[in-house]
Image (cartoon, rainbow, N blue to C red):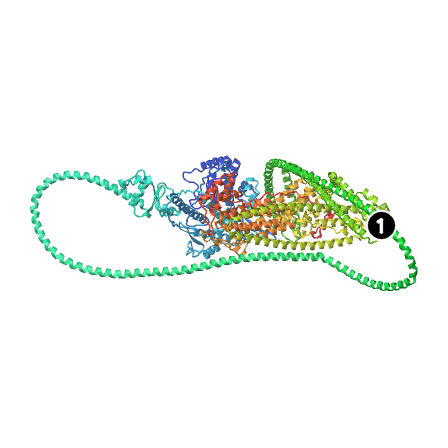
Amino acid sequence: MRTYLLEKSRVVFQASEERNYHIFYQLCAACNLPELQNLRLAHPDMFFYTQQGEAPTVDGIDDSQQFLDLRDAMSLLNFSNEQQKYIFQVIGAVLHFGNVEIVPEKHESSKIESDNENLPIVCDLLGVEEAQMKKWLCNRKIVTVREVLTKPLTHSMATFSRDALSKRIYAEVFNWIVQHINKMVIPTEKVLNFIGVLDIYGFEMFEVNSFEQFCINYANEKLQQQFTQHVFKLEQEEYVREQIEWSFIDFYDNQPCIDMIENKLGILDLLDEECMLPKGSDDNWCQKLYDKHTGKKHFSKPRTSRTSFVVHHFADKVEYQSEGFVEKNRDQVNDEHLNILRASQYEFIANLFKQPAEPVDLNKGKSAQVKPLRGVSKGHKTFKKSVGSQFRDSLRYLMSKLNMTTPHYVRCIKPNDFKKAFDYEPKRAVEQLRACGVLETIRISAAGYPSRWTYPEFFTRYRVLMKPKDVNRNDVRGTSEKTLQKLISDPDKYQFGKTKIFFRAGQVAYLEKLRADKLRAACILMQKTVRCWVQWRKYQRIRNSTIIIQKYARGLLARRLVKYMRRTSAATCIQRRWKGYHQRQKYLHIRKAIVTIQSYTRGMYGRQRYTVILREARATTIQRYARGWMARKRHRKVLKAIILLQCCVRRMRARRELKQLKIEARSVEHHRKVQKGMENKIITLTQKIEEMKEKSVKAKEQEVTIQKLNSQVIVLEKTQVEAKEATKRANEAETEIERLRRELGEVTQHRDKLATDLENIRRQSEEASKDHEAESAKLKEDLTEKENQMKEQQVQMEERMKEEVAAIRQETAKEIEEERSRHQKLLQDYNRMEQRCENLKEDMLALQSAPPGAPPRSRAIRTDSNEENESGYGTLSTSTTEDAENIEREIMEQGEELASMDMSVFLKLQQRVRTLEKEKKQLQDLMDKNEDNNKNIASTTANELQVTNNQLQSLKEENASLKGDLAARINDLVTLRASLQGGSGEDEPMAILTKQLAALNEENEKHRKEVLKLKTELANSGKVINNNKDVGINTDVDLLPDLSPEVEEMSKDGGLQMAYKSLKMTNQILEKEIEALKKNHEHEVQQLREEMDKLRQDNERQQEIIGQNLQLTPEARVNQVAQHEISRLTNENLDLLEQNEYLEKHVKKLKKQLKAAYKRVTQSQHESISSAAPSITSEASSMVSNSMAPIPHNHVNEAQHPSHSPLLRHKEYQILGMLEYQPHDEQRFIKSIITDFQPKHAEGHLPGLPAYVIFMCIRHADYMNDDRKVKSLLAGVINGIKKTVKKHFEDFEYVSFWLTNTIRLLHILKQYSGEENFSNQNSDRQNEHCLRNFDLSEYRQVMNDLGVHIYQMMVRIIENKIQPMIVPSMLESDSAGLTTNKPTGLRGRSASVSEDYETRHVSIDSLIKQLAAYLQVMSKHGMDPELTKQVIKQCFYLVTASTINNILLRKDMCHWSKGVQIRYNMSELEEWLRSTRMYDMGMEETLEPLVQVAQLLQVKKRTVDDVDLICETCTKLTVTQIVKILNLYTPDEYEKRTEVSFIRKVQARLHKRPDPRRETQLLIDAKHTFSVVFPYNPSSVLVTEINVPDSFSLQFLRKM
């Protein structure tokens, strides 16, 4: 059941002789029942809303009995007694509402008298406060930038506001009843067919026609169009089924009238535009209609009126009065009224007016009339849909539903206007037949073949017209065809079908006339025969008597005849002469006239024939020139496309060459940078070499001069001693010869001994190499066996774990669903209580802000200081006086107390939820432990394999080194032999040999020891790994033996212990850095593995795309390849540029950090060691937080080896990681850190720093065991975040920043809660900082709910921004360069595209740029990666849903080129996801339906194989969606239209799917939001290492 236009105006106004809705009169008639006594009802004439029509009763209808029947029907539909009570209670309140009198007052204001009896009854029935309702019925709230104002309403405005609220209440109850009935009548079994009944109003035309009549007549226009097309379709199906030839039947098309109403700049569009204007009026709107539509066929302007207009409908012309159109279209109800009703003490009434999610736009327009909504600018309230827009959308949904069904029509004709029986007015009936389109339907039917006879019926009926020789009872059809061809000569007057004969209008009447004539002739023949016999008998009697009479009479007659003949002969002679003369004159006159007419006629025919020949000749000439021009245009277009393709290819090649040149240039520059230092060193070395060369040259010259002098001295000495030496040489020569002979014998013996030793060494080395090879082969075998065993164990463990996890997930899923339902119920209760609290706050603040003694309405406008009003998240009132500040402080204190009270109630209600959460966490911990055990087993085995591989590799390297050493020794021996054989020297060969032999022995001994050591390590690999894990920092005992005597002296004074502690602290810092580096390394390895998986998936996808491309034509394949190559190159260039810019910024940032760190370290050298240790700690923490930049080695060495021994005597202070503030500074703290905090102040600091600061304050309160301080602080933080987010509800940066800090505070509260499942992941230092006195698990749930609320708000901001960009960027923009013509069969739909987006040129790059901006903001604020992925996934779901819904509703989007465009845009989005490392299986599943839609548009639609391909490919699309796309598919220029039989085959194949209810869904719910999950993400930052920046303005905090 669905409501299309509820006539709400009938609730507050009825014309004469009209009644209001029957339920009002039924309640009044049954007011004496006990269960209705509390409604305080009476006769209908006592209520204003039921007495205007002056017709409280209807003859023949008992309202009291009708009420009892209504109660029975509601009970039958499972309406509980309580629900019926609340329904009647609300309807009774509407009746009393009409009697609430509003009295005008001075200064354009109004009021309600205090003695009004109906207002208390209304408030009692609705469960709201009388004071608030009385106040806001006569006032309204105005929200400005800086303050909130209350403005009195005039009498007319207040009355209109009262009536609008009454209509809204009745409409909400009506809609709730319809929804409840729909829930009750939903079938539980599988539904294949259904019967829907549509009760629609008829065409209305009264003396005064307003907005309601316009909407009704607009609906009748649409229904008449569908009815006419349906009748024409039935006729067409009958002709097709009978296989007869037929031509197009012309019928009246009211599409121009519908376009004038609903198209852009149409009547409804102009009305919506006028409603959005602040001062829009009916006269301005009417003037716009005159300006835009005057001169159109279906619109005219009355002569005597300027406030009315006439629309030419299909039934008649209707004049509409524009008065009230704008207000009725707005249907605006004050938000204050709705807030009061939402705070009702009755849950039923509060739920009626709760703020629902925005309904899905089921049909955004007819095909080619989709207008994307503009994004709402910041700071403005979002306008709701007008009544006209809602009615238009629901009417389009009705049309789509009727098009999917087989409609049948029942036309009800009203015989008279007086409700009298047996009184029929023909004129009135004809008017109704014309208004409902029956006469037009009859005309359409008569234009074809309205009369039909089956062949047996025709044979039986018209047997009398057949000749006996033509009758053949075995061939009825042939006999009928022969007979009909003889009876009707024109073959166009009838058609022979498969089972029927179709006749034009009048042909059956003609056959009936022939049949009647034939029967009449037969009757006449029988009558003639009988009458002939009767008359013959009578004739014989008369003849005898007549003969006698004739005998006497003939004589008399003969005489008279002679006389007559004489006279006649004379007269005939006279007449002959006269007639001859007269006829000759007449003939001559006629002949002359005929000759004249023939001459003029032949001349006219000749001229006409000449004109025809001349026109044909000229038309032929025009066609010749036109076809030539079209051929040249087509040639130019193809030539232009070819040139464009060539340019793209050349540009692609040029970019490749440019990229290669850039790479070469960069590589050269890199080598230059690397080798710049080497060149400086080489230059210095060359300079030194040149200096050394100059010195050597000078030394050589000096040596030459010295040698010359020495030579001269030697010559002189030789001459002196020559005589003495000559005598001794002879004796010495003989002794020397004998000595050399002895030494030669010894050398030969020693050489033989070395040869034998060399042979032994060779043998030993060969044996050692063989042993090494055998051991390596054995190790390889062991390694392969261990790998196989590990693989088998891993497969078994994975299978077992999968089964266990699946069973646990199924059990926990049910519990989670129940828990969520309870949790949502509690949230609804809390929101309703919070709404009531806000309303009370408004009244209290209004009373406090008014001056004492002044009346409440002494001023027309007053300032309201409420911060949380419902109409747009108002801002704070800015007043500069001290009184205003005091009042604001008091209000804040009272608001906090109320909030704490509500929170305590809320926390009690969540006790059950908390227990269920603990059970859930226990199950989750068990699953995590099992997964960790599997990971540990896999990691240990992987480590063992890695160790064995490393050892095997080291053995291979050592074996190769031994072989190399052996070869070197052999070469040395060869050279030694050569030198010995040469005999060049005395003792040098022996010295060389001995040295080489000693070195060889040492090397062999060394290698033997290393081989033995490796064997032992390989045997005990498991023990070695455990021993390596147990190795830690040097203990005090290890360091004490290395102490020098000077240090022992220092230990006596106590400075040594302080120095040791500082050294130990630096060691711990280094360990943290090493752990952080290990984590980063593991993260990078994980990312690389994910990238490998993604590349593998991309490779498979590219192969699929290549396989699909092979099925395309060569031209299309070339175009697609070129487009993909161009897009890939542009993306690569952009990525390289971004990476270059990022690296440059990162290098500059690191340089600045290094300079700052170096300055701090140099300054710390002149300070005491007590201040040095904290500074080093803070410096290390800052370095770890800033991209894990390594500390310079000189700084680390200074920290590890302090050289300033006199400064080690000072004492160290301990940082507790707490922040203290005074109780009176709490509001100041919340205002500084939350309310007035700007996200730009947190840039450059630790992500989530405000959350850390808040926790440090909470930790101090926990440390002091101050229960009140903890509660007030947490309540203030939660309320402050709520207010800040509401205040900036359209600022994405603020919402993202506070979502990050809220989630970070939630994780910190979990991390430092002291619970075992959280503390296991902390370090020892972090566990020391856990909370000790308070359990804040209840507040964690509140923080979680607040995070969900902020997340949904952020998703709404993104949806409002990117929703208008989706359709232009994904469907309407031509980013892929596909300049295709509009598909045939479309009727000028390009004019309906939004002009705004044509000027803006929204493309896929704009959409990606917007998403990248959102991602950059979230990354800048340090949002968790998993949460960021959930936001991006929600965005892509919106893109997929909106795109598919527009394709399903627009026929111009369903063609082949549009599928190529979608594939191109999808590739761009996927490339962006991969570049940002956001692409995973979740993203792929989200985009899969859109990919399948593109494939469905591109696949062939001809054979059975194509049917199988469509069914196998489109798994994410429903049957209704696939069939809809196939029906809407429009072929391009060279394609054939999809056959109906093909669509039926696809539909028959798809009906075998298991979930038939899902397969009937047409549109995707674009407003669906995935459930958000905040995975636990502990922080590695210590609270003792956090410093509060000065930019936070928190100088009043004291660090403990």
Pointer 1: what residue? 744
Front residue of this view, candidates 47 and 837:
837
- Could one spot residue 1501 in this view of the protein? yes
- Could one spot residue 143 in this view of the protein? no
Q: Residue at x 56, y 56 (%)?
A: 649
- Side (left or right) of 647 relative to 625: right
Q: Amino acid at mark 1?
A: Leu
Locate residue 1492, reporting x and y percent.
Answer: 53, 46
Dot 1: few (<14), some (14–19), or many (≥20) neighbours within 10 Å?
A: few
Locate residue 1241, reporting x and y percent.
Answer: 67, 52
Locate residue 1484, reporting x and y percent.
Answer: 58, 45
- Side (left or right) of 1571 relative to 76: right
Front residue of this view, candidates 1081 and 1522:
1081
Q: Secondary structure at mark 1?
A: helix
Q: Residue at x 79, y 61 (%)?
A: 693
- Side (left or right) of 610 relative to 209: left
Q: Is residue 710 above or below residue 1427?
A: below
Q: Quadrant of residue 769?
A: top right
Front residue of this view, candidates 1598 and 854:
1598
Locate residue 1056, reporting x and y percent.
Answer: 83, 46
Q: Is residue 369 above or below residue 540?
A: below
